[in-house]
Amino acid sequence: MFKIDVISVRLIFALFLCFISVSYSQEEASIWYFGFNAGVQFNAGSPDPIVLNDGQLSTEEGCSTISDSNGNLLFYSDGITVWDKMHNVMPNGTGLRGDPSSTQSGIIVPKPNNPDVYYIFTVVNEANAEGLCYSEVDMNLNGGNGDVTSVKNVELLSPSTEKISAVMHGNDTDIWVIGHGWENNSFLAYRVTPSGVNVTPVISNVGEVHGGNTASTIGYLKFSPDGQKLAVAKWSNNSFVEILDFDDTTGAVSNPVTINGLFYLGVSNGAYGIEFSPDSSLLYVGDTNFSTSEGRVHQFDVTQPTANAIINSQTILNEGTEIPGALQLAINGKIYISNTSTGNLDVIESPNELGANCNYVSNVVDLSPGIAVYGLPPFIQSFFSVAINVENVCLGSETEFFIEATDEIESISWDFGDGNTSTEEIPTHIYQTAGDYVVSVTVSTTDETKTFERDISIYSVPVANQASDYILCDIGNDGEESFDLNTKTTEILGTQSATDFEVMYYASMEDAENKENELTIPYLSNNQEVFARIYNAQAPNCYDISSFNLILSQQPEAQPIQDIITCDNEIVDGSETIVFNTITPIVLGNQDASLFNVSYHLNETDAENNNGNLPTVYTTVNNPQEIFVRIENTDNNTCYDVTSFNVFIEDQIIAYTPENMFACDDASNDGVEVFNLTNQENAIINGQSGDYIISYYSTETDAILSENAISNTYQNTSSSETIFARIEKDTNANCFDVTSFEIAVLEYPEIIMPDSYNICTNETVILRAPIGFNSYSWSTGETTKDIIVTQPGDYTVIVTKVFNTNPITECESSKTIQVIESDEAIFETFEIQDWTDNSNSIAVFVTGLGDYEYSLDNIVYQDNPVFYNLEPGEYSVFIRDKNGCGVIYEDIYLMYYPKFFTPNDDGYNDFWQIKMASHEPGLEIYIHDRHGKLLTKINPNSLGWDGTFNGELMPTNDYWFVVKRPSNGKTYKGHFTLKR
């Protein structure tokens, strides 16, 4: 279907600040120098720029250029150095207060009504000292090449953000230059008049505060070309964009709208470049993400009545790995973008158009050897106000022309650039050939007559050729399939150039007409009609639409077929007859048999090409033999599936009978043991070739049916059982045989003898094993039932009992006997507690290998080596080895002293003496009177003290004694009474 766009939308040429008395032309912005020695020139009559390589400027960000009204270069600057039109540094053209890392390091503004004087406004980076300044350039100096005068680096604002822009005053003579303060929300508008720069600004405290991290000073500030709006990009740390109203008469800023939450977040991310469309209706914002090397451009419709409506009008353009820098409107009505990722320029071809119709194109201008970085030169935005408005630029449509003027038009004359003219105020014209034209209009009002020119392009309208229906097999039969619609582009283009025309696809005619909801490719869809819009790549509204159908055919799925494995019959010929009709239902599964054909083939090629169909009943010729199966859609045989299965013919198999299995019982002697039945497998297979599965059962029926198999490690439930073994091919369970064998548990040969024996030092002991075993094996190497040992230690005997089973089974057991050495005790010492009537004690200390007991009479023994409650006197302590290895004894004496004596020669108690003193040689005994006077020293072997001192009888009284006992090193003291 052929379509000519007659929608009344003003294209890139429609601008509204179109007063007949405009003081400046566009040509002042025709030359740009920027980046690393990059440059372009826009010439009248040419829609695309020419690349310049003669620039000396090399900077990352802000820069500025100015030409005369005829487009001849005057000078350019990076905000620090000024180069003249000959690309030489002006004599006083260094040391300006811009910065190579300042967003808008400088902008050049002409002095009104003076074609020879210009002002360079500069801003330093990141709110550093010196802020916003201006310097004056006089073009009469330096031989007419211009120089910076003594009016240099005049400070206007400090600190300042990196933002600056300029626009015409409402009187069409003066110019407003605006900046933004730091750590505040102040806009400062400076008025440039024929008298110079008014250093007293109009201050508007409105909108968001710009402060915090100094990276937040970064981002562009731009006026709209009609001078009615102002936009600010704040980069870094919760980036945002502000859109405000500007009064070009008073310089006041008002009505802020803040857009946030839509831009990349982070210190090194956010909104940076910013630009209005030529008609001031749309705002474009470059959004950078240096953290992930991503970027995008946002478009907003600033004509919307509310802040939310503006935000909701967002369209994202060119999102991906290319990071945009500055955005700058050019005199050809297009917006150019510094592509920081490639060093080239991107372009928005139709910036007055909403959404994708604006036609964003990447890398359209190759600047080699120059490189675009972040900045592009800003200009007075009023330079981009154009008088001629054009609608409908598709070839064959009526192209409409008009101007807007504030004064009444008395006469008007149009020249359409193809030899045709008109004197109508709003004429229409149909161009016969696509191409570029210079349209001019001469307008007369009551005040003056002026001629305006505009370069326009008339674009070819493509033809949407009819594409064939797009048919796919519905893989997975889920009602959807992925269509690569691009495969239809060649059909729709036909002989038309793929470079000049592009094709997009939509789900409805309405979407195709409005260029909305473009289908993603690949496109997941079912049966539906798709509309293809072919359009001119340079003018998307020059288009045509055709449609075609997406058709899904049901895709059959060949269900898997298990290989057929069978046993060879008695003929043993290695072949098998197959009835394919019994297999077809398996291939179909749940699929409708009426929708599909199933065929069988000898090889995959025949199955793929549907050749060489096999008969329904087929006898195999090979072993094994692979059969290929094809299932296809009866309505569309390109939708098919192929599978295969194998036919294996196995040899017959025999289960040989193995020997019975016997297990020796363990020490529990419970008649239950675990049998490893896999030990029977070699005997059951008996050398047959192939891979087999052997399983075991408790009954023959279970073995035949292959049910209730028992574990290969089987624990019996009775002392004797029959086990049935089934052997089968691992590839075919139907090829099997069954045999059986017995299992039994034999009695444990228990060794009943003591766990330990005792042996006295230097003696022997006999270890006697029980009778009833066939063999004995001692750890000493002896094989007799009994052995004689002379040393203590562990001795192990292994006995073997032979059972007369078939096959004969030997069971053995072992026992370790401990031979423990013992000996008579070795007396070490004793401790006594005496000097009482009957509460004395003796503690004996011995060493030795044995286990000892103790006695005072060699009759009654105790385990405790301490005897209590003893009277004074003489004792013999016996120490006996419990294992019979000897008895020793030791004599011990318990001492005591009398409490009184009566030395009256009556034969009773005539002497005082320590009892048992004579049994301890070296005992020292001293007698003192009550005053401590030594009376005598008693010999322990004497009768004792007779009660005299120097031959005199001592009187009745208490006397004191001191006894020094060398056997334990102790001294004892006490007293007794002498009675007369």
Image (tube, rainbow, N blue to C red):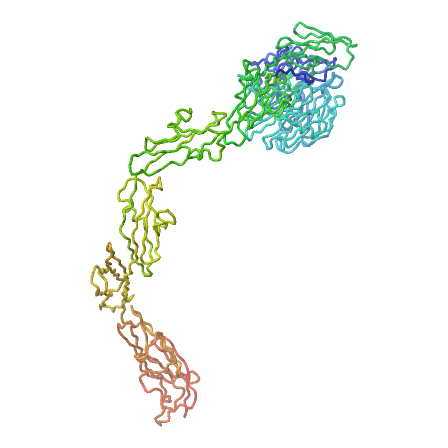
Q: Nearer the viewer, residue 244 or 593?
A: 593
Residue 513 to residue 868: above or below: above
Q: Nearer the viewer, residue 308 or 964?
A: 308
- Residue at the extreme top: 419
Residue drawn at 51 percent across, 25 percent down: 472
Whole-percent x and y of residue 306?
72, 29
Q: Nearer the viewer, residue 251 or 144?
A: 251
Is 774 displayed left or right of 146 in the figure? left
Q: Quadrant of the C terminus?
A: bottom left
Q: Quadrant of the N terminus?
A: top right
- Residue at the extreme bottom: 906
Is 697 displayed left or right of 384 in the figure? left
Q: Residue 345's image quarter?
A: top right
Whole-percent x and y of residue 270?
61, 29
Residue 974 to residue 816: above or below: below
Residue 840 to residue 700: above or below: below
Q: Is residue 124 visible?
A: no
Q: Residue 536's image quarter?
A: top right
Is 517 displayed left or right of 751 in the figure? right
Q: Is residue 458 visible?
A: yes
Q: Residue 76's image quarter?
A: top right
